Image (spheres, rainbow, N blue to C red):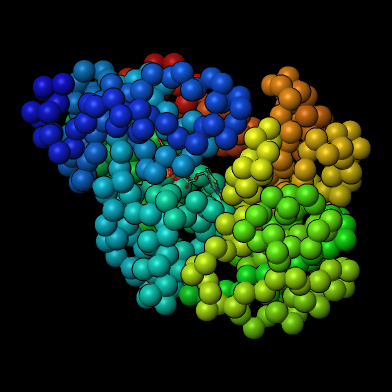
């Protein structure tokens, strides 16, 4: 303890139990499976709160010298236990690295601890806006989103993090003398959604889009299928600029207590953000699928009050869990050519044990129905029975009930493992999150 304090100074090191416990947790309690496994986890032995790249490098060099694990965190809003230090050691909180370095024409260069909401506000004042962000944007950091998230509001137009939504990153390695790497292009794949296992990101450049004035709508439909077909048609309509299409079956909208007066009962709802001026087209499209617009808020209220996006992505799950603590969720990719058939098969088999919530996104040039379905949790066995059934009918599951990268949403991790061997030869960065032998 004395040595690290001498090396780094008292202002950036904390050993008190309260800080260690607080900064050793994230939103893993979202999953009853993870909650069960992680709630007894011991907190980190110490916390570092660096303010500069030099201090980050000093913490990493110290950890390397004494073979102490280092687990990084931004705001700790990840919900897979990604930021939990499974093997103790140091938690390095990067929230003080919060400088916006540059807002250029079409891009922003920021330190990793900048909150996405702050970046977007600053960009909008400069006539631009961020392209994609999670529904946790008020708290979440840019570095935490890039290292632990995937997509969100805006993904219906710009795809997820892997679709050109990170332009460049400054990475520090975990070695005797940490190297400073400037990474761009395909090489970024080894650092996006890496849980801080292959290197520590201190600076990120993200693309910006021209500022749009957004309208928020809720369209409602007598059946969930018609709400999905409307969502697909709108997703494919190149004439309507949008950043959110989130269909949900009833009773999911009934969980949104702050909006309840604006929600028609017993109907599916589609939460929407569309560019100002396009309401007539979208309303006509909704009517052609038997729907109607029950709630419309103009751009003057954007971000001034609770927004429709506060009920989408994983915030849908949050509202549901507030209403019924036995609800949990899955992450799923449906077949764009047969999603209605897949939805019907799951409903036939599990009924209202599974409640559908979709997010239409763009990926690899296609429009894709992704889902964060709600599930009434009975047991781990039953949850995996549902998962295995979904997989058996061609629905891809990105398991949110694991902290291991190899088993979750990241897909193939071979190239990340190779990168880790070079950048973190002692396996000290966030141990346990990637299956890796030193
Ligand atoms: P943290 O939770 O602090 O960290 C995330 C991971 O990245 C950890 O493994 C951490 O070790 C690592 N990390 C953090 N900073 C760095 C760094 N600088 N260098 C290297 N590694 C680092 N996610 C989405 O993608 N889309 C959503 O719409 C979305 N909605 C959510 C809604 C709710 C209600 C909740 C609870 C979570 C949601 N999430 C979503 C997950 C999460 O909030 C986001 O991914 C968020 O961007 C994480 O940012 P953070 O700063 O809190 O990161």
Q: Position of residue 159 (x, y in %)?
A: 59, 56
Left or right: residue 388 compared with residue 206: right
Comparing 239 with 175, the one in front is 239
Q: Is residue 232 visible?
A: no
Residue appearing at x 74%, y 82% in the figure: 280
Write down the quadrant of residue 324 in the picture: top right
Q: Is residue 386 visible?
A: yes
Comparing 109 with 140, the one in front is 140
Q: Position of residue 113 (x, y in %)?
A: 33, 49
Residue appearing at x 70%, y 71% in the figure: 295
Left or right: residue 311 compared with residue 39: right
Residue appearing at x 50%, y 36% in the figure: 27
Quarter holding the N terminus is top left
Q: Position of residue 162 (x, y in %)?
A: 53, 49
Q: Is residue 281 above or below residue 317?
A: below
Left or right: residue 200 compared with residue 61: right
Quarter holding the C terminus is top left
Residue appearing at x 19%, y 32% in the figure: 13
Left or right: residue 315 compared with residue 204: right
In the image as oriented, which residue stretches furthest toward the left? 6
Q: Position of residue 91 (x, y in %)?
A: 31, 30
| Image label count | 0
Write down the quadrant of residue 233 in the picture: bottom right
């Amino acid at each position: 303890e004395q040595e690290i304090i001498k090396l780094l100074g008292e202002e950036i090191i904390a050993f008190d139990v309260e800080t260690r416990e607080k900064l050793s947790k994230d939103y893993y309690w979202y999953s009853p499976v993870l909650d069960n496994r992680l709630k007894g986890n011991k907190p980190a032995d110490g916390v570092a709160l660096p303010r500069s790249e030099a201090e980050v490098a000093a913490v990493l060099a110290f950890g390397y010298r004494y073979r102490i694990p280092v687990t990084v965190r931004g705001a700790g809003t990840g919900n897979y236990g990604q930021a939990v230090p499974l093997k103790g050691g140091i938690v390095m909180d990067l929230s003080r690295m919060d400088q916006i370095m540059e807002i250029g024409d079409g891009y922003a260069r920021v330190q990793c601890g900048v909150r996405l909401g702050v970046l977007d506000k600053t960009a909008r004042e400069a006539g631009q806006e961020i392209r994609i962000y999670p529904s946790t944007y008020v708290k979440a950091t840019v570095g935490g989103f890039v290292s632990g998230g995937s997509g969100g509001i805006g993904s219906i137009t710009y795809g997820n993090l892997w679709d050109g939504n990170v332009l460049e990153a400054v990475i520090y390695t975990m070695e005797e003398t940490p190297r400073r790497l400037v990474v761009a292009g395909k090489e970024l794949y080894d650092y996006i959604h890496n849980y801080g296992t292959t290197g520590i990101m201190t600076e990120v450049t993200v693309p910006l889009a021209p500022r749009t004035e957004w309208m928020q709508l809720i369209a409602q439909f007598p059946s969930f299928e018609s709400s999905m077909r409307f969502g697909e048609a709108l997703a494919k309509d190149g004439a309507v600029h949008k950043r959110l299409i989130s269909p949900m079956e009833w009773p999911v909208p009934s969980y949104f207590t702050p909006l309840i007066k604006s929600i028609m009962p017993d109907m599916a709802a589609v939460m929407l953000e569309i560019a100002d001026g396009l309401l007539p087209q979208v309303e006509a499209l909704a009517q052609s699928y038997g729907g109607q617009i029950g709630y419309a808020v103009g751009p003057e209220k954007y971000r001034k009050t609770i927004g429709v996006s506060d009920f989408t992505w994983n915030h849908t799950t949050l509202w549901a869990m507030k209403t019924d603590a036995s609800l949990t969720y899955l992450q799923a990719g449906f077949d764009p050519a047969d999603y209605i058939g897949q939805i019907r098969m799951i409903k036939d088999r599990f009924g209202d044990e599974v409640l559908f919530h979709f997010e239409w996104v763009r990926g690899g040039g296609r429009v894709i129905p992704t889902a964060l379905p709600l599930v009434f949790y009975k047991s781990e066995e039953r949850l995996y029975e549902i998962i295995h059934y979904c997989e058996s009918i061609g629905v891809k599951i990105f398991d949110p009930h694991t902290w291991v990268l190899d088993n979750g949403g990241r897909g193939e991790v071979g190239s990340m493992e190779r990168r880790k061997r070079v950048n973190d030869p002692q396996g000290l960065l966030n141990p346990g999150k990637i299956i890796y032998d030193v």
